[in-house]
Amino acid sequence: MTADRGYRVAESLSAIHGRTYHLASRLLPAPQRRAVHALYGFARTADDIVDLPVVGPDDRLARLDALFAGLDATRSGGPIEIDRSGGPIEIDRSGGPIEIDRSGGPIDVRLPPDTIALLAAVADASQRFGLTPGQFAAFHHSMRMDLPAAPEFTDRYRDMAHLREYTRGSAAVIGEMLVPLLGADATRPDTLAHAGALGEAFQLTNFLRDVGEDLDRNRIYLPADELAAFGVDEAGLRACRERARVSRPVRRAIAHLVAVNRDWYRRADAGIEDLPRRTRPAIRAAARSYADILRVIEERGYDVFAGRAVVPARTRVRHAVAALF
């Protein structure tokens, strides 16, 4: 019953925050659709923790670690203790306090009932479809890279290889998790590679769409060397943000990265054909709708500071119908 409630929580999160994914998921059979919602809901919950206002120096990190430790506890069927950064993390699956002792004293973190239910759904989906602890650990690593209190913290990226250390856990591994959920052969290296590439293509699209919002959080997810090739540095990006208008050098840099992103979609496209016929349309629709964000950015003259690039609902529906038929 807890897992059923968690699946409902996950579907609600997907409907509110992941409109492209939610629409595409409606093309899936019910068991796969529920599992995709659970995975999305978990990723969204982790992302929301990372973006919380800072209450204390370790608050967000404590909450993030508690979320992943709670998943470990739920998957293992009982309470666990994890020694991380100087003290144990004690997980109470009943919903009581989670005490995290991190060098400065205990931090009381409580997992809300909906989150506990969501973890039950993720654990259930993991068991049904063979998702591994290592995959969630890679995702956890990338989420910690966003938090200043974590040793892994990174908010600027030297080059694309450096950025892909982050997108490996934040996006590629999510694509790999979807492979068994969609009924494809998770033992085929090419299938996993294509799935990971599509996840990273989605992520780069997010980075291009959200340049301004990320700057407001003091993060830059665009490779510094790629920007520098067009004469763009952090000061130039911030000047554009303040004016809410893109400069010519930034416009050229964004145009270049949009072309790179399109190439990533092309490289990943072959992997969609590896999916079973029944689940293929959902991923095809999601890929078309997400790649269409790049078209919106192009039509705005690559001005990523003029407002968030959004694909209209009618266009997303058209992509879904085209993918289905």
Image (cartoon, rainbow, N blue to C red):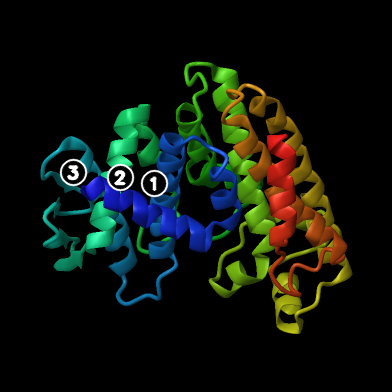
Residue 71 position within the rendered picture, expressed as x and y whole percent measured from the top left? 26, 46
* Residue 270 at least partly seen: yes
| Residue located farthest toward the top when viewing the structure as drawn | 188
Mark 3, secondary structure of its residue: helix
- Whether residue 146 appears in this view of the structure is no
Q: Secondary structure at mark 2?
A: helix
**Whole-percent x and y of residue 93?**
14, 52
Give the percent coordinates (x, y) of residue 184: 52, 22
Above or below, 23 against 156 in this view is above
Q: Between 100 and 157, which is closer to the camera in this rendering?
A: 100
Query: Which mark, residue 38?
Result: 1
Question: Residue 131, percent across and down?
Answer: 37, 31
Instruction: Give the distance between the C-alpha atoms of the residues marked 2 and 1, in whole angstroms.
Output: 6 Å
State the SS at label 1: helix
Amino acid of disc 2: Ala
Relative to 228, say whether 24 is above or below. Answer: above
Query: First in sequence: mark 3 or mark 1?
Result: 1
* Location of residue 310 with respect to 138 vertically, above or below: below
- The three-letter amino acid code for the residue at tag 1 is Ala
Within the image, what quadrant is residue 266 found in?
Answer: top right
* CB within 8 Å, label 2 to label 1: yes
Residue drawn 53% across and 16% down? 188
- Give the label on residue 325, or none: none
Residue under pointer 2: 121
Q: Which residue is mark 3?
A: 73
Q: Nearer the viewer, mark 3 or mark 2?
A: 2
Quick one: 34 or 236, which is closer to the camera? Answer: 34
